[in-house]
Amino acid sequence: MTIQEKEQEVIERYADIDDWMDRYACIIDAGNELPELPESLRTPDRLIEGCQSRVWLDAEQDADGNVIYRADSDAIIVKGIISMLVEVLSGHTPDEILDAKLDFIHAIGLDEHLSPTRSNGLVAMVKQMRAYAAAFKAKGN
């Protein structure tokens, strides 16, 4: 499934939920489904700078060259946000990740309904995910 197809799934998941408290509840539920990050990966070098809460992000490349992300957060709403990013971007090549527009963020209204500090955190999460992809791309060239 392409990144765009994964984004469309996320958009459709939230399309019929008009109330933002209900959307937040669904985002929290998504975070609760994110596999727990092992303690061994909750290290300072995996913390994302610029997030109000603590967010750990780990990435590796599989045998096919796809980037696999794992993440966790100590804040339930942030864990839900990072889980959506992991769902959409994980399993794709560095080039696909770097080229992704991530239109689902605007399409579901996430960019409009987060506090300024949470919005900054979202930008930081995307930036770090792209930084991992760029590093893997550079390593492959």
Image (cartoon, grey):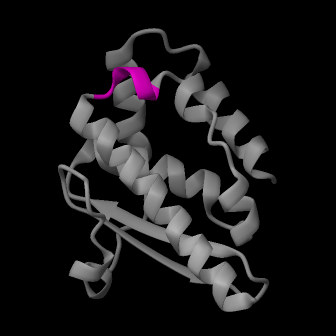
Q: Position of residue 6 (x, y in %)?
A: 71, 45
Q: Is residue 18 magenta?
A: no
Query: Which residue shows up at 37% across the image and 19% down it?
Result: 22
Q: Is residue 112 magenta?
A: yes
- Where, by quadrant of the figure, is residue 13 drawn? top right
Residue 15 visible here: yes
Q: Is residue 56 left or right of residue 130?
A: left
Q: Position of residue 37 (x, y in %)?
A: 35, 73
Query: Which residue shows up at 43% across the image and 28% down it?
Result: 111
Query: Which residue shows up at 57% across the image and 80% down it?
Result: 135
Q: Position of residue 139 (x, y in %)?
A: 65, 90
Query: Which residue shows up at 74% across the image and 66% down it?
Result: 95
Most extreme residue toward the top, as rendered? Answer: 18
SS assignment for the magenta stretch, majority: helix
Residue interval drawn in magenta: 110-114
Give the total of numbered labels.
0
Assign the C terminus to one quadrant of the image. Answer: bottom right
Assign the N terminus to one quadrant of the image. Answer: bottom right
> Would you place residue 72 above or below residue 107 in this image?
below
> Would you place residue 91 above or below residue 16 in this image?
below
> Would you place residue 23 above or below residue 138 in this image?
above
Residue 33 visible here: no
- Where, by quadrant of the figure, is residue 134 drawn? bottom right
Q: Is residue 102 left or right of residue 77?
A: right
Q: Is residue 90 left or right of residue 29?
A: right
- Where, by quadrant of the figure, is residue 102 drawn? top right
| The one of 44 and 41 positioned closer to us in this rendering | 44
Q: Position of residue 140 (x, y in %)?
A: 72, 89
